[in-house]
Protein backbone atom coordinates (compact mmCIF):
# COMPACT_ATOMS: atom_id res chain seq x y z
CA UNK A 1 0.00 0.00 0.00
CA UNK A 2 1.44 3.33 -1.01
CA UNK A 3 1.17 6.53 0.93
CA UNK A 4 -1.34 7.81 -1.63
CA UNK A 5 -3.82 5.06 -0.80
CA UNK A 6 -6.49 5.40 1.87
CA UNK A 7 -7.03 2.52 4.31
CA UNK A 8 -10.47 0.94 3.84
CA UNK A 9 -11.55 1.63 7.41
CA UNK A 10 -10.75 5.35 7.01
CA UNK A 11 -12.82 5.73 3.86
CA UNK A 12 -15.57 8.29 4.54
CA UNK A 13 -18.02 5.99 2.78
CA UNK A 14 -17.24 3.23 5.30
CA UNK A 15 -17.32 5.47 8.34
CA UNK A 16 -20.41 5.14 10.50
CA UNK A 17 -22.68 8.16 10.47
CA UNK A 18 -23.15 9.70 13.91
CA UNK A 19 -26.38 8.57 15.53
CA UNK A 20 -29.04 11.22 15.71
CA UNK A 21 -31.00 11.89 18.87
CA UNK A 22 -34.48 10.31 18.55
CA UNK A 23 -37.17 12.88 17.83
CA UNK A 24 -39.27 11.67 20.76
CA UNK A 25 -36.44 12.63 23.14
CA UNK A 26 -36.10 16.05 21.55
CA UNK A 27 -39.87 16.60 21.79
CA UNK A 28 -39.96 15.42 25.40
CA UNK A 29 -37.04 17.62 26.46
CA UNK A 30 -38.54 20.68 24.74
CA UNK A 31 -41.91 20.00 26.35
CA UNK A 32 -40.36 19.70 29.81
CA UNK A 33 -38.49 22.98 29.40
CA UNK A 34 -41.64 24.77 28.24
CA UNK A 35 -43.69 23.27 31.07
CA UNK A 36 -41.10 24.30 33.66
CA UNK A 37 -40.96 27.88 32.34
CA UNK A 38 -44.75 28.14 32.26
CA UNK A 39 -45.18 26.66 35.73
CA UNK A 40 -42.53 28.96 37.20
CA UNK A 41 -44.09 32.05 35.65
CA UNK A 42 -47.58 31.10 36.84
CA UNK A 43 -46.68 30.55 40.48
CA UNK A 44 -44.15 33.39 40.90
CA UNK A 45 -46.43 36.41 40.60
CA UNK A 46 -48.83 38.12 38.23
CA UNK A 47 -46.23 40.29 36.52
CA UNK A 48 -43.88 37.41 35.83
CA UNK A 49 -46.80 35.67 34.16
CA UNK A 50 -47.62 38.84 32.20
CA UNK A 51 -44.00 38.98 30.98
CA UNK A 52 -44.21 35.37 29.78
CA UNK A 53 -47.50 36.01 28.00
CA UNK A 54 -46.16 39.15 26.32
CA UNK A 55 -43.08 37.30 25.02
CA UNK A 56 -45.25 34.45 23.83
CA UNK A 57 -47.65 36.86 22.14
CA UNK A 58 -44.79 38.54 20.30
CA UNK A 59 -43.53 35.18 19.02
CA UNK A 60 -47.01 34.23 17.88
CA UNK A 61 -47.44 37.46 15.91
CA UNK A 62 -44.02 36.86 14.32
CA UNK A 63 -45.04 33.34 13.25
CA UNK A 64 -48.38 34.59 11.94
CA UNK A 65 -46.68 37.28 9.87
CA UNK A 66 -44.22 34.76 8.46
CA UNK A 67 -47.07 32.45 7.47
CA UNK A 68 -49.61 34.88 6.07
CA UNK A 69 -47.39 37.66 4.68
CA UNK A 70 -44.10 35.90 4.09
CA UNK A 71 -42.20 37.95 6.66
CA UNK A 72 -41.87 38.10 10.42
CA UNK A 73 -41.59 41.33 12.36
CA UNK A 74 -42.81 43.77 9.76
CA UNK A 75 -44.76 46.88 10.68
CA UNK A 76 -48.00 44.97 11.09
CA UNK A 77 -46.42 42.40 13.41
CA UNK A 78 -44.81 45.18 15.44
CA UNK A 79 -48.15 46.98 15.86
CA UNK A 80 -49.86 43.73 16.84
CA UNK A 81 -47.11 42.87 19.35
CA UNK A 82 -47.34 46.29 20.99
CA UNK A 83 -51.12 45.87 21.18
CA UNK A 84 -50.83 42.44 22.80
CA UNK A 85 -48.33 43.77 25.35
CA UNK A 86 -50.49 46.81 26.14
CA UNK A 87 -53.62 44.70 26.54
CA UNK A 88 -51.83 42.27 28.87
CA UNK A 89 -50.50 45.09 31.07
CA UNK A 90 -53.78 47.02 31.16
CA UNK A 91 -55.82 43.93 32.02
CA UNK A 92 -53.36 43.09 34.80
CA UNK A 93 -53.80 46.65 36.09
CA UNK A 94 -57.58 46.26 36.13
CA UNK A 95 -58.21 48.62 33.20
CA UNK A 96 -60.08 46.53 30.62
CA UNK A 97 -61.69 49.72 29.30
CA UNK A 98 -58.33 51.06 28.14
CA UNK A 99 -57.35 47.63 26.84
CA UNK A 100 -60.48 47.56 24.70
CA UNK A 101 -59.72 51.06 23.38
CA UNK A 102 -56.16 50.02 22.46
CA UNK A 103 -57.47 46.92 20.72
CA UNK A 104 -59.97 48.93 18.69
CA UNK A 105 -57.39 51.50 17.65
CA UNK A 106 -54.91 48.80 16.66
CA UNK A 107 -57.53 46.94 14.64
CA UNK A 108 -58.36 50.12 12.74
CA UNK A 109 -54.67 50.84 12.09
CA UNK A 110 -54.04 47.33 10.78
CA UNK A 111 -57.16 47.38 8.60
CA UNK A 112 -56.29 50.70 6.95
CA UNK A 113 -52.55 50.03 6.66
CA UNK A 114 -52.92 46.64 4.97
CA UNK A 115 -51.39 46.28 1.52
CA UNK A 116 -54.59 44.58 0.38
CA UNK A 117 -57.97 43.70 1.88
CA UNK A 118 -56.93 40.04 1.95
CA UNK A 119 -53.74 40.74 3.89
CA UNK A 120 -55.64 43.08 6.19
CA UNK A 121 -58.22 40.40 6.95
CA UNK A 122 -55.55 37.82 7.76
CA UNK A 123 -53.68 40.33 9.92
CA UNK A 124 -56.83 41.13 11.91
CA UNK A 125 -57.56 37.43 12.29
CA UNK A 126 -54.04 36.91 13.64
CA UNK A 127 -54.46 39.76 16.12
CA UNK A 128 -57.70 38.27 17.41
CA UNK A 129 -56.13 34.82 17.47
CA UNK A 130 -53.49 36.07 19.92
CA UNK A 131 -54.94 38.97 21.89
CA UNK A 132 -58.12 37.34 23.21
CA UNK A 133 -56.33 34.32 24.73
CA UNK A 134 -53.77 36.72 26.24
CA UNK A 135 -56.59 38.83 27.70
CA UNK A 136 -58.30 35.76 29.17
CA UNK A 137 -55.17 34.24 30.68
CA UNK A 138 -54.00 37.47 32.34
CA UNK A 139 -57.50 38.18 33.65
CA UNK A 140 -57.83 34.71 35.16
CA UNK A 141 -54.35 34.88 36.71
CA UNK A 142 -55.23 38.25 38.21
CA UNK A 143 -57.71 36.66 40.60
CA UNK A 144 -55.87 37.03 43.94
CA UNK A 145 -57.47 33.93 45.47
CA UNK A 146 -57.76 31.33 42.72
CA UNK A 147 -55.77 32.85 39.86
CA UNK A 148 -52.88 30.41 40.12
CA UNK A 149 -55.22 27.41 40.43
CA UNK A 150 -57.26 28.59 37.44
CA UNK A 151 -54.25 28.84 35.13
CA UNK A 152 -52.79 25.54 36.31
CA UNK A 153 -56.19 23.94 35.73
CA UNK A 154 -56.36 25.24 32.15
CA UNK A 155 -52.79 24.16 31.41
CA UNK A 156 -53.36 20.71 32.91
CA UNK A 157 -56.46 20.20 30.76
CA UNK A 158 -54.67 21.33 27.60
CA UNK A 159 -51.61 19.15 28.20
CA UNK A 160 -53.79 16.15 29.07
CA UNK A 161 -55.85 16.65 25.93
CA UNK A 162 -52.76 16.74 23.71
CA UNK A 163 -51.19 13.68 25.32
CA UNK A 164 -54.37 11.62 25.51
CA UNK A 165 -55.25 12.40 21.88
CA UNK A 166 -51.83 11.30 20.69
CA UNK A 167 -51.70 8.13 22.79
CA UNK A 168 -55.32 7.19 22.10
CA UNK A 169 -54.92 7.67 18.36
CA UNK A 170 -51.72 5.63 18.24
CA UNK A 171 -53.05 2.76 20.35
CA UNK A 172 -56.61 2.52 19.02
CA UNK A 173 -56.27 3.81 15.45
CA UNK A 174 -59.44 3.63 13.41
CA UNK A 175 -61.28 6.08 11.20
CA UNK A 176 -59.68 9.42 10.38
CA UNK A 177 -61.20 12.49 11.98
CA UNK A 178 -60.54 15.02 9.22
CA UNK A 179 -58.23 13.49 6.59
CA UNK A 180 -58.24 16.58 4.37
CA UNK A 181 -57.19 18.83 7.22
CA UNK A 182 -55.03 16.64 9.45
CA UNK A 183 -54.44 13.13 8.05
CA UNK A 184 -52.98 11.66 11.26
CA UNK A 185 -55.87 12.51 13.59
CA UNK A 186 -58.43 9.78 14.34
CA UNK A 187 -61.85 9.71 15.91
CA UNK A 188 -60.50 7.46 18.64
CA UNK A 189 -57.82 10.00 19.52
CA UNK A 190 -60.43 12.76 19.46
CA UNK A 191 -62.76 11.05 21.94
CA UNK A 192 -59.96 9.90 24.23
CA UNK A 193 -58.52 13.44 24.16
CA UNK A 194 -61.89 15.01 24.99
CA UNK A 195 -63.00 12.62 27.73
CA UNK A 196 -59.75 11.96 29.60
CA UNK A 197 -59.40 15.57 30.88
CA UNK A 198 -62.64 14.99 32.76
CA UNK A 199 -60.49 13.09 35.26
CA UNK A 200 -58.33 16.19 35.68
CA UNK A 201 -61.38 18.30 36.40
CA UNK A 202 -62.73 15.79 38.89
CA UNK A 203 -59.36 15.66 40.63
CA UNK A 204 -59.19 19.46 40.83
CA UNK A 205 -62.70 19.47 42.24
CA UNK A 206 -61.72 17.05 45.00
CA UNK A 207 -58.61 19.09 45.81
CA UNK A 208 -60.43 22.43 45.98
CA UNK A 209 -63.17 21.19 48.37
CA UNK A 210 -65.28 24.25 47.48
CA UNK A 211 -66.69 23.02 44.20
CA UNK A 212 -68.65 20.11 42.76
CA UNK A 213 -66.15 17.69 41.18
CA UNK A 214 -68.42 16.40 38.43
CA UNK A 215 -69.26 19.97 37.36
CA UNK A 216 -65.58 20.77 37.02
CA UNK A 217 -65.17 17.52 35.07
CA UNK A 218 -67.77 18.80 32.59
CA UNK A 219 -65.89 22.12 32.34
CA UNK A 220 -62.71 20.16 31.61
CA UNK A 221 -64.42 18.27 28.80
CA UNK A 222 -65.67 21.56 27.32
CA UNK A 223 -62.15 23.02 27.43
CA UNK A 224 -60.75 19.82 25.89
CA UNK A 225 -63.25 20.11 23.06
CA UNK A 226 -62.06 23.69 22.47
CA UNK A 227 -58.48 22.36 22.38
CA UNK A 228 -59.38 19.83 19.70
CA UNK A 229 -61.14 22.44 17.59
CA UNK A 230 -58.17 24.79 17.97
CA UNK A 231 -55.83 22.05 16.79
CA UNK A 232 -57.98 21.44 13.71
CA UNK A 233 -58.26 25.16 13.01
CA UNK A 234 -54.50 25.63 13.01
CA UNK A 235 -54.07 22.54 10.82
CA UNK A 236 -56.59 23.98 8.37
CA UNK A 237 -54.74 27.30 8.23
CA UNK A 238 -51.38 25.60 7.69
CA UNK A 239 -52.84 23.41 4.95
CA UNK A 240 -54.24 26.53 3.29
CA UNK A 241 -50.72 27.94 3.11
CA UNK A 242 -49.08 24.60 2.32
CA UNK A 243 -46.78 24.35 5.36
CA UNK A 244 -46.21 21.64 7.95
CA UNK A 245 -45.14 23.85 10.87
CA UNK A 246 -45.64 27.51 11.70
CA UNK A 247 -41.88 27.85 12.24
CA UNK A 248 -38.90 25.88 13.56
CA UNK A 249 -38.70 27.78 16.82
CA UNK A 250 -39.09 24.80 19.21
CA UNK A 251 -36.98 21.67 18.53
CA UNK A 252 -39.21 18.69 17.82
CA UNK A 253 -42.42 20.72 17.89
CA UNK A 254 -42.17 23.30 15.12
CA UNK A 255 -43.44 26.71 16.06
CA UNK A 256 -44.99 28.12 19.22
CA UNK A 257 -48.37 28.13 17.46
CA UNK A 258 -47.95 24.39 16.90
CA UNK A 259 -47.45 23.94 20.63
CA UNK A 260 -50.26 26.20 21.93
CA UNK A 261 -52.86 25.76 19.19
CA UNK A 262 -55.18 24.06 21.67
CA UNK A 263 -54.43 26.46 24.53
CA UNK A 264 -55.54 29.55 22.60
CA UNK A 265 -59.27 28.70 22.18
CA UNK A 266 -59.35 26.89 25.54
CA UNK A 267 -58.09 30.07 27.24
CA UNK A 268 -60.82 32.14 25.59
CA UNK A 269 -63.51 29.66 26.66
CA UNK A 270 -62.08 29.59 30.20
CA UNK A 271 -62.25 33.39 30.29
CA UNK A 272 -65.87 33.37 29.13
CA UNK A 273 -66.75 30.86 31.84
CA UNK A 274 -64.93 33.08 34.33
CA UNK A 275 -67.48 35.81 33.57
CA UNK A 276 -69.75 33.97 35.99
CA UNK A 277 -67.86 35.90 38.67
CA UNK A 278 -66.41 39.09 37.19
CA UNK A 279 -64.81 40.15 40.46
CA UNK A 280 -63.10 36.75 40.90
CA UNK A 281 -62.80 35.06 37.46
CA UNK A 282 -60.76 32.18 38.85
CA UNK A 283 -63.64 31.33 41.12
CA UNK A 284 -66.04 31.78 38.21
CA UNK A 285 -64.13 29.09 36.34
CA UNK A 286 -63.51 26.66 39.18
CA UNK A 287 -66.25 27.03 41.82
CA UNK A 288 -69.58 25.39 40.97
Image (spheres, rainbow, N blue to C red):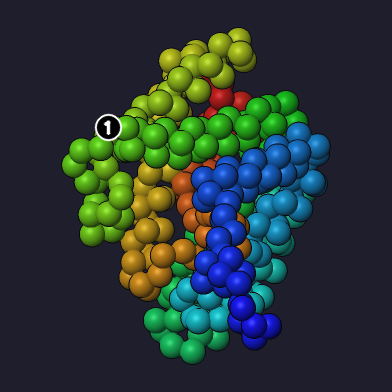
Residue 163 falls left or right of residue 77: left
For residue 193, side relative to residue 208 (left or right): left
Q: Looking at this view, name the residue that lies furthest to the front.
A: 1
Task: Tell me if 236 is positioned left or right of 21 in this view.
Answer: left
Q: For this rendering, which residue is in front, 99 or 3?
A: 3
- Residue 113 locus on image (x, y percent): 55, 86
Horizontal side of 17 relative to 102 (left or right) equals left
Outermost residue, left side: 175
User: Label 1, on which residue?
Assistant: 172
Instruction: Say which residue appears at 33% left-offset and 61% top-offset.
Output: 236
Q: How many marks?
A: 1
Q: Residues within 10 Å of mark 1 (few under 14, many from 20)?
A: few
Give the answer, above or below, for where 19 lies relative to 150.
below
Residue at x 76% of width, y 34% of height: 43
Q: Is residue 203 above or below residue 148?
A: above
Q: Residue at x 49, y 32 (%)?
A: 160
Question: x%, y% of residue 105?
Answer: 61, 72
Amino acid sequence: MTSSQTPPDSDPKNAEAPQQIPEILIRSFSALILAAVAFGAVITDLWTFVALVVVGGGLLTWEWGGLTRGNGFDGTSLIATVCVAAVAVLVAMGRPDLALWILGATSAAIAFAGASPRHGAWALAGLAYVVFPVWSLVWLRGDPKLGIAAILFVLAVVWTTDTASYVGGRLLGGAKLAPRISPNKTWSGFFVGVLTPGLIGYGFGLALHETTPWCLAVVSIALALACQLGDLLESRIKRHYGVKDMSQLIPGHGGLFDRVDGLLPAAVLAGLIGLRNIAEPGAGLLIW
